[in-house]
Amino acid sequence: MLDALLVKAKGLGDNPAMDFDIVIVGGGLAGLSLAVALRQTRLSVGLVENKAPFRPEGWDARIYAVSLANQAFLQDIGVWQHMDAQRLCPVEAMEVAGDRDGRLDFSAYDAGAAALAWIVESAQMQCELWESAKRQANLTLLCPARPAGLEMQPGAAHLLLEDGRSLKARLIVAADGADSWTRQAAGIEVDFKHYDQKGVVANFACELSHRHTAFQWFINDGQGRDGILAWLPLPDNQVSMVWSTPDAHADELTALAPAELCARVAAAGGHRLGAMALVTPAAAFPLRLMRAPRSVAPRLALIGDAAHAIHPLSGHGINLGYRDAASLAGVLADKPEPMDCGDLALLRRYERARKEEVVALQGVTDSLHRLFSPSWQPLALIRNTGLNLTNRLPVLKDVLIRYALAS
């Protein structure tokens, strides 16, 4: 099928290819932020996306913790200042509890920062990025559109869309998620590690004030409800929950009636915020680690989930994607004028700039997941002692906070 589509792409004599410097496949947060970050360059950009974003009624169940570094990135590209401030919530403190007596506390005040992070709805960020993209002079939005064929040639890449349109570009950027069509079409094989867990998400209204505090519990209760429970603060005394838990327990949670789910979630958090009321229905998504052997190839760059996927316990998934976009945009904006933006030597600058952080964070989150998964008692003692020891070492805590703020 792909070969036939490529032949068709070569034979479109009555339908000449649209010519771009860069074509981004995927209009999620990473792809859109890269497109908008290129707004002041001379590069012509095309973005392929099947469906324009929309704001759901009420609150979005997809919530992200955006680091201060990425808040600054969104500010620099003209997006943050247009978001509804009444739907943003700063994280001023964080409480982490082990599965026994371990505890770790972080404070923005102690770190000399205004906040540790900002809690933002995915839809709000995506819609504001989309609005900026629509006004961008050097950007063509191809929506609705789906890719159907890809051919890499020495002089250019050729992308065929399902509707028959043909695109020519010096560089293709895959920003189409962990199951990236573009990455597969380019022949880049990746390694998936399935955690046999799902992330259950939902939003709740709480009886007690969260005081702009994020909460995280590592749970081993011996009843199959193991995992990592996080409550992220939202405006109006609401929280967004992410419960990373074994598949069977995740399915059980999503099947509960609203009152039962609220009672279960409140109890798992030790009733820290009192009684809870459901604001958005529970949904679940599979958790997995994805490593790609490389993030660039001739005329191709991977960003966001197309380049890497990690366990959500650190809250860094979207932050990695934004840093990818900022780094690649910087490399492309600073390239010498005659240099081809699809040149592999140029793209390797982006790969080198991002490799250390991505590899380190994937290793840390995977190790923490394994450390807090078993119920073997000696290991439980080690992991909880580690939390308490870190909590008593201000220098180590400061290093962790500084890394989180800058990532």
Image (cartoon, helix red, strand yellow):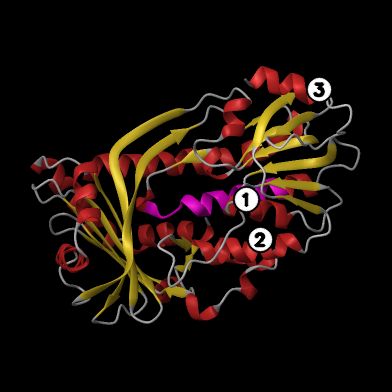
Which residue corresponds to mark 1?
A: 27
Pick whichever, 392 or 43, lies toward us: 43
Mark 2 Cα shell of 10 Å, populated few (<14), some (14-19), many (≥20): many
Earlier-in-chain disc, 2 versus 3: 3
- Please tell me the numbered disc located at residue 130: 2
Callouts 2 and 3 close, C-beta under 8 Å: no
Q: Residue at x 79, y 60 (%)?
A: 136
Name the amino acid, label 2. Trp
Which residue corresponds to mark 3?
A: 10
Callouts 2 and 1 close, C-beta under 8 Å: yes
284 left or right of 348 in image: left
99 left or right of 327 in image: left
Earlier-in-chain disc, 3 versus 1: 3
At which x and y percent is residue 93? 36, 72
Q: Residue at x 46, y 70 (%)?
A: 57
Indicate yes or no whether the magenta region holds residue 325: yes
The residues bearing labels 2 and 1 have C-alpha atoms spaced at a distance of 8 Å
Q: Quadrant of the N terminus?
A: top right
